[in-house]
Image (cartoon, grey):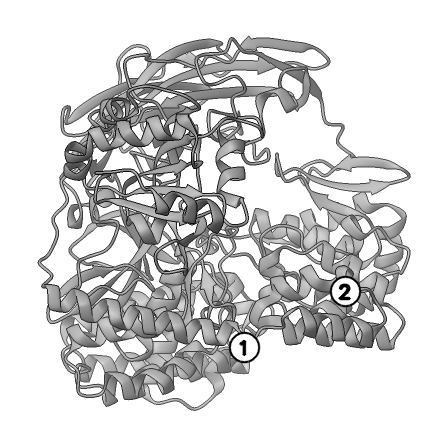
Amino acid sequence: MKKTTQLFAGLLILTGVLSACSPAGNEGFMRRVETDFRHKQELLPRGDLFGIFDEPMTRQEREAMMFLYAYMPVGDMTDYPGDFYLENVRSALATRREMPWGDIVSDELFRHFVLPVRVNNENLDDSRRVFHDQLAPRVEGLPMYDAILEVNHWCHEKANYQPSDARTSSPLATVRTAHGRCGEESTLLVAALRSVGIPARQVYTPRWAHTDDNHAWVEAWADGRWHFLGACEPEPVLDLGWFNAPASRGMLMHTKVFGYYDGPEEVMKTTANYTEINVISNYAACAPLTVTVTDTAGSPVEGATVEFKLYNYAEFFTVSRKTTDGRGQASLSAGLGDMLVTAVRDGRFGIRKVSFGREPQATVALDHAIGDEFSFPVDIVPPAESANLPEVTAAQRAENDRRFNREDSIRNAYIATFPAQPAVDSFARAIGVKPGQIARFITASRGNHGEIMDFLREASRKGCTGRALQLLATLSEKDLRDTPSAVLADHLYNTDKDADAATVLAPRAANEMLTAYRSFLRREIPAADAAAFRNDPQLLAAWCRDSLTLRPELCTVFTTVSAEGVWRSRVADKPSRKIFFVAAARSLGIPAWIDPVTGNLFYRHAGKDVPVDFESANDRQMETGRLKLRYEPIPRLDDPEYFRHFTLSRFDGQSFALLNYPDFEPWSARFDTPTDLETGYYMLATGSRLADGSVLANVSFLNIGPNRTTETDLPMRDNSEAVRVIGSFNSESKFIDARTGRETSVLLTAGRGYFVVGLVGVGQEPTDHALKDIAAKAAELEQWGRSIILLFPDETAYAKYAASPAASLPQTVTFGIDRDGSVRRQILDAMHLPGNVPLPVFIVGDTFNRVVFESHGYTIGLGDRFLHTIHQL
């Protein structure tokens, strides 16, 4: 009670100070912050989460801390000490006083886009202080615009792009690793910009409209306006990146602004943690659309859940979820293309296509009951390209290229310090294992290799090397790159040596931050409770149901509360409760896991896998049925792939939740024969992506009943007159440039956009014919302007060709050597070609990894066929 009294007294003093010294707008804002802060404190009475406010602070520090605590998610309060945030606040305030632009950054910009520690769903770290100390000297004397460019050059020294899983590493972990996916690169750049007092925010297109996947980049504020830039991809000027053209075809770009925000942008959503704003108008032409939901009699329906869905990876992905108002309406502004809209209320739903820019109003009638079986085709057209590129002089480009190459060399010099094979061999001998047993763990750990080697060294000293290797085998590559040895040791030495590795020893339950929860929970759970839970794990489920308070409204940024944080605060959201159950069960030696496909929670007891239902007092028996999908092949698609051509989603009471089967698993591997599914109502989506980005889709609704098999068609639509995406090729694939002898990639050679890759022989008539056909169309192919990369199998073959080269090939041709055969293998696998396929093999692809054309062996008129395809792109 004493602490609470002191805290409220401090708030009253703060309010008085603000009334006397702050502008009226800021005073009103801080009154709202104070109200939200007090409400948060009332909801979270356990765990001494607000104890830091007993520490002495200046008025500015207390105001900033109150703002952070009013809006940060529960996990950030339970999993990081108050001192961590106070140090960040003091650093941010000191930087604002230090930097020359501190005076021109408004309180609103500072509060929302400099002060917050969190950018995405990353682990939080001390990057603000570390980055400031490195960057402050580099930006000294620069105007704000140039400082933004300089910070991005520094980030490129530290990391470049590499795809990985959805969990976001901390900024310092990305620097240690020296690479990251776009979400991690942009988190790094935002953290770096904020460390020197520059307002910055991460921008996402949740899904592209014209192709699969998504992307994240950064907006930074300078001299009165927001500019965009590609993170760790420095350009000579702002508002330029490889994604200018794709972004102009986007349908939605958004950013999550920390706290309650009342800026000029369209607000898409307001939560207890953030305000989501729509920034599509910064990148593409857009238009508003209002959906009116009606019942079967035509009356408006209030309180219906409306989802705006983009086709991407064969799923209609929800990019915005809204609730209808008293007029039955929900609105969104988006790029000038097509989406599906669903509306759900009280066991009924409606679904239809909407076209932004062509229809400002659309009505969705709730004319289907949950359980109705029906199917319909739908053509989805993305926005047209309308890129706006800023001017870059030749001198600017040359200087940027020079710096880019130097930054690559700096980063590569750091990467060269990672253990090479001789060091791995020596370490293996030192701990008494074969190099092959540890090489993949050490190599994958990259800059975290010291932590992994320390863990293995200590395990060897304690005679636990084999068990330690079992633990490492349960981890993802990202876990190896950013998990401290102390966390791994906690799980190794607090788990029975005979327990199952996958369901007991493994530290990870879902996509949470790994922590040393095992010793903590073994210590904190009373012995009598632990014995009861082991004897009947359903009692642990009942404890979670009865003892934990769900506060999903306070956990909206896709972070989770750690197991320790849940125990201390007795607060969780549904994902954190599942993770806590797994953590507690495994800490007590009970096998438990979350199913990666359905998200259902299980434990194993008395030899049986038991599903957990927190709403039931007894063990739940999951009812299952079977599904078989019948498929009639269309040209060049004998075996459709999950996530590339089709997906399944199950109705969860409010929307359709995607089943996460393995990426690109072929239809024949699972659905050609009946496969088990939980009973329920399902949506089956299929789609054929055409080269212009449009999609020939089909949506079907079906039921899976208990103990019976449902058979239905897997309809893949085709248009023989249009260019269709027929496969995937990784544009990051490496080869040796025959002219320079240096390793490069298709992406670096071709730049963003379409390209041709050919696997060619030498002294072979089919290749000679192909090259002559290409030469015959040299002028048209040069006018197209895209790279044609011709790869020989080895240096000998290229030397033989170079002695008598083909005449008059386009100037856009680059010769290369596929020395290790990796490009050949990838093309053959993607195109389902046999290993002895006759050369040449040609594909037309793009840097979104789509293939739209393939040819192999002897063919006439290849140049014409290229142009026929190109003209339809």
How would you rate the neighbour count of disc 2 (Cα within 10 Å): few for under 14, some for 14-19, many for 20 or more? some
Q: CA distance from mark 1 to mark 2?
A: 40 Å
Position of the C terminus, as image quadrant, is top left
Residue found at x 72% / y 39% = 612
Residue 435, labelled with which disc? 2
x and y percentages locating residue 292 in the rendered image = 24, 24
Q: Give the amino acid at mark 1.
A: Pro
| Secondary structure type for disc 2 | helix
Query: Which residue lies under the disc numbered 1?
Result: 81
- The residue lying furthest to the front in this view is 803
Q: Give the amino acid at mark 2.
A: Pro
Please state which of residues 781 and 394 is positioned toward the viewer in this rendering.
781
Residue 607, labelled with which disc? none
Please state which of residues 125 and 672 is positioned toward the viewer in this rendering.
672
Occupied quadrant, residue 486: bottom right
Please state which of residues 118 and 820 is positioned toward the viewer in this rendering.
820
How would you rate the neighbour count of disc 1 (Cα within 10 Å): few for under 14, some for 14-19, many for 20 or more? some
On the picture, is 484 further left or further right than 248? right
Q: Is residue 174 above or below residue 461?
A: above
| Secondary structure type for disc 1 | loop
Residue found at x 70% / y 10% = 708
x and y percentages locating residue 585 in the rendered image = 78, 53
